[in-house]
Amino acid sequence: MNPYRDLDDAYQRLARRPARRTIPTGQGGDLDAIVVAIRDDAPDSSRSDQTLRALIAAGRTNPDALTVALYALAPELRGRVSRAATGEYHADALGDLALVILDSELDRPGLAHRLVNRAHNRVWRNARHVHTRGVVNVTTTVPCPPDRLALLHDHRPGITADIADAVADRVDLERFQAAIESAVAEGLIPSEVWAAYRDHRLRRAVSAGLPVSSSRERVAAHRAAGRLAPYIDAYLGLHAA
């Protein structure tokens, strides 16, 4: 498995198609010029930041722009990941980088380095996350495959999930919501904890075009997930909760 080669192939296919070589970034350059501008972020990152922001903005309606952004940032990420890491770990790192690109604050300088750093930290934490809980009744949380996450975020016509999976997901979510709302009504869970988890983790998994979440929102959602862990394990153990 070599996810970087797959990414390189995807980029080269774009670069070989003249009609797709130019993506609106406000920089007036073709794909190769955009990549060079993003990677040339030291000692002054202003041009790199501006180009990357424009590319990410274009990527919200043009997936090719996100491919270019990933390709531009991939070498630094690859350099950060240990050479002893498995191909699966590198693939997870690229997947985390794609998610980080779409869900990060873009206003601070040094954007390229910050996105790579956040993706690297995220995959490092996830790789060490304990997915098994319990002693008597042992349960295992199965991470959602990256292609499933991409499907949840993709609302293009003609792309649909298996109907049986969709029904099962809906039933599990409704049971989860009913259990949480009952716990909130009984005073077992603060309403603000449920709101933080619902608005950040659940709504963002199925809704496109939402504003970028802030650091405070991400921290609140992470803490809320810890408080709701027993319910998540019971009702959403096989989902990307």
Image (cartoon, helix red, strand yellow):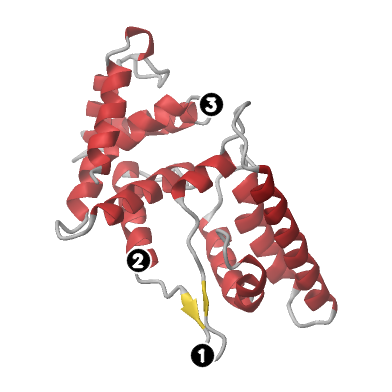
Q: Which residue is mark 3?
A: 61
Which residue type does callout 1 highlight?
Val
Identify the residue at image location x=55%, y=61%: 216
Q: Select label 3 or label 1 by which is in front.
A: 1
Which residue type does callout 2 highlight?
Ala
Dividing the picture into quadrants, the one containing residue 14 is: top left
CA–CA distance between discs 2 and 1? Answer: 22 Å
Looking at the image, the residue that sits furthest to the top is: 18
In this view of the protein, can residue 72 be seen by the observer? no
| x, y percent for residue 88 | 30, 54
Dividing the picture into quadrants, the one containing residue 86 is: bottom left
Which residue type does callout 3 highlight?
Thr
Identify the residue at image location x=67%, y=56%: 199
Q: Earlier in the sequence, mark 2 or mark 1?
A: 2
Numbered label attached to residue 135: 1
Q: Is residue 43 above or below residue 190?
A: above
Q: Earlier in the sequence, mark 3 or mark 1?
A: 3
Q: Earlier in the sequence, mark 3 or mark 2?
A: 3
Looking at the image, the residue that sits furthest to the bottom is: 136
Mark 2 closeness class: few <14, some 14–19, many ≥20 residues within 10 Å: few
